[in-house]
Structure formats: structure tokens, C-alpha cells
Image: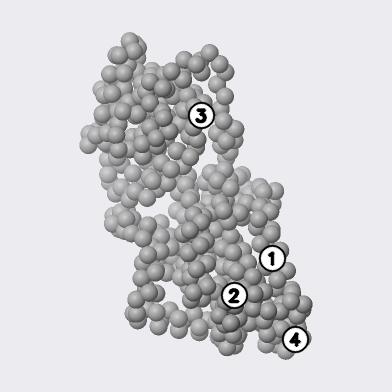
Amino acid sequence: MESTTNPLADRMTPLAAQILARAEDVTQRFKQAEITADHFFLAILEVRDSDAARLLTALPIDVLAVRDHVEAMLETLPPATESAQLVLADEVRLLLKRAGADMQHRNFQQMDSLNLLSGLLQVEGSTATSALLKRGVTPESAYSRLRFAKEQVYKVPKAQQALNEMKAPDSVGEAIRKVVTSISPIFLGLVALFLGSGYLLWADILSNRLMVFLYVTAGWLVSLALHEFGHAFVAYIGGDYTVEQKGYLTLDLRKYTHFALSILMPLLFLMMGGIGLPGGAVYVQRNLVRKRYMHTLISAAGPIANVVFTIFLAIPFFFFQSEVVVGGTLFFWAGTAFLLFLQITALALNLLPIPGLDGFGIIAPYLPNNILAAIAPLSRYGILILFALFWFPNPFQDIFWSAVMSISALILDTGWIWEGYGLYRFWEG
């Protein structure tokens, strides 16, 4: 690693020098100290007036997908210590060397943004370079496309154009209006299925085990969407305007998830053992959120959504225990009890202080950077740690289930939960 001093600075065009300065800003935004080729790639895209940025957005590739992939990778890197000095990685020194060679090869008087892009494409190992090369972007193809593009009018893709115009909301009211106008029909359909199947069970119009399965599953998916939306909405208010472009404000489950890991696996756990496994995930641009307490609120917003949904499910039992005539059938009360139990389970699991779960995210902003750096590699294995805790016999399981059942007993007769669990598993009889 070397210092950030650039021996070619006096031979750079103003836009090229701006890219180098922006690379430093990007690195600091991600709370890192080593400027890498991936930071350089993001810097090129952010200096939108440069030929390199205009070219990348004009190429027939999804440059936004590349950017999102690079940002997601950088988010997983451990933060630098507070006293760390900003340095250039060896790959960036090589990038600048290759850019200088490209400048001389093309007889340019000064190093411009295209020379920097060419240097980036000749640096092996970076996420951005690999993604661009995979999409057929090479130094020669870039210059060839540039010649064609200069004869035409640059056409920025609509998705990039929309992103350029996005910003964080000026108020909570503005954020709410944005959500109201963009709610997904898929989410509304899930809500309709949940409420409709619940009514059919309550009114004894269609009371059977399959309907209990639909009712509980639809309710669980609604709660999952609300949980992830909670994270995204608070992040949006906190400054991460990219959640809008990613579709997180629509409550569309497809936007929050990897289908297998985020929906299929939790549903399988639900059907096999009645465990409310945390499922979806939103990718928040934490570098865009400036205030420390907002990072805590972002992590807490998901569990808070679970609390609100749990209260909603608990209200019927309050009337039931108060001997207010509310009607309903065994199927309705047992199914609702089981769904409420799943919410309490999911809430308890999410609040565990395990890297990758919300409980850890709530306290992480207040931990020293050296501890965060040591723990960061574990964040991607949070779900596996959770799986191990419930797969292999250990004292944690007894403590956990005892706590969950005790909380549930404050709301309802726990016998309803076991009844609901049996009815939910319609395939067993």
C-alpha cells in the first residue's frame, strides 16, 4: 500500500483529477481507509460529466446492476479504525500506471477519464473489473463505442436518469406520500388473501385445515413484507434514497429477497417445525445515512413492525378473554394463535445479538471500530449460526422456547398454539 499522493496529478485533466478526489470520498463514505479499484469505479460513475461515466451509461449493459453489486460487496468489508490513514491500494497504483501507458499510447497530452477507465479494465481481481469484462467491456471496445457515441447524442438509460434525479425525502410526510403511491398489487393481494381467508374461517363459511394453512402463510408473508419495509422506510428517511430505486418502498416481497434463502427456506422451516425464521433482506446504503442513531433505528424498524403486527393479532384474544362476544371458530382462533406465536418467535430471533441479525444491528453503531472489524466476517453467516443453535441440542433452545411460551401465555391460552400448529400441517391428516 502507498500514500494517496499521485505523481501524475499535474498531467491529469480536471475531470480525471476530480475522479481521483471522488474515489477518496467514496472510500471514506464506506468507512474504509484503502482506496481500491472498486472505489475508483464508483467514483467514475459519480463524476457524471466525464466521458467515462457517459460512456458506461451509454453502453448496452446494465451498469446499475454492476454498481449495486460493487456497493453490496464494499458494504461487507470491515470498517477501518478511526486513526487509519487513507492510502492507495497496490491495484490502484497499477491502475494509474496502466492509465498513464494508455495516455501515451493514444498520444494524449493529459490523462483523462477514459484513460482511467482503461486502466481500471486492466486491473485483475476487482469486483468492478470482473463484472465489466464479463459484460464484454474492454479498453478497445470502450474506445470503439466512444467514437460511435460521439457521432450520436448520448442517451442515458431511463433507470440511470431516474437515479440521477432521486434524493432523500425532505420530510416524513413526503416519504409517506411516496409509499402510498407505489404500494405493490402483490402486497395488496397478500393482504386480501390474509383477511379474506381469516374471515372465511371466522364466519365458518369455509373452515378446514387447508384454509388455516392459507391464512397463516399469507399472514406470515404480509408480516415479512412489513418487517423489511420497516427497515427500508427508515433508511429512506435517514438519507438512503437508493431504496426507492430498488423498489423497497413498494412492499413487494420480490424486491426484498433472494427467493431460496429469503422465502423458500423460511417457509420450509415454518412448515417443518413451526419456527418463525427471519427471512427477507434489504440492502441499505449505510454510507448515505449520516446520523448514528438512524443506523440503530433502521435495524430496529423491522422488529417494531413485528410488534405492531403482533398487537394486531392479539386484539381478538383481548376481546375473547374479556368475554365479549366476537364469534369465530376453532379453526380461526387456533390459526390466529399459531400466527401470533410465529410473530413472537420471529421477534425473539431477530433481536438476538448475532452478526447479521437486527439485534446486533441495533447495537453495532455504538461498538468500537476494531470490534466491528473483527466481527464483520461473521455477518454473512448469521443465519447459519441461528440454524446451528436450533439444530444441535444445547441449553439455548430450552431458554429460548421457555421465554417465547411465557410471553405467549400473557396473551392467550398456549393450548391454542398447539392446536393451530396441528391444523396448519394439513398434509399430515
Q: Secondary structure at mark 3?
A: loop
Residue at mark 4 to residue at mark 3: CA–CA distance = 64 Å
Q: Is residue 262 visible?
A: yes
Q: How many marks?
A: 4
Q: Which residue is mark 4?
A: 324
As drawn, is 89 to the left or to the right of 420? left
Q: How is the image coloured?
A: one colour
Mark 2: which amino acid? Answer: Leu
As drawn, is 97 to the left or to the right of 348? left
Mark 3: which amino acid? Answer: Pro
Q: Which mark is residue 60?
A: 3
Residue at mark 3 to residue at mark 1: CA–CA distance = 41 Å
Quadrant including the N terminus: top left
275 lies above or below 168: below
Q: Which residue is mark 1?
A: 193
Mark 1: which amino acid? Answer: Leu
Sequence-wise, the earlier of marks 3 and 1 is: 3
Q: Secondary structure at mark 4?
A: loop
Closest to the camera, between mark 4 and mark 3, is 3
Residue at mark 1 to residue at mark 2: CA–CA distance = 15 Å
Q: Which mark is residue 339?
A: 2
Q: Nearer the viewer, residue 369 or 394?
A: 394
Mark 4: which amino acid? Answer: Val
Q: How would you rate the neighbour count of disc 2 (Cα within 10 Å): few for under 14, some for 14-19, many for 20 or more?
A: many
Sequence-wise, the earlier of marks 4 and 3 is: 3
Closest to the camera, between mark 2 and mark 3, is 3
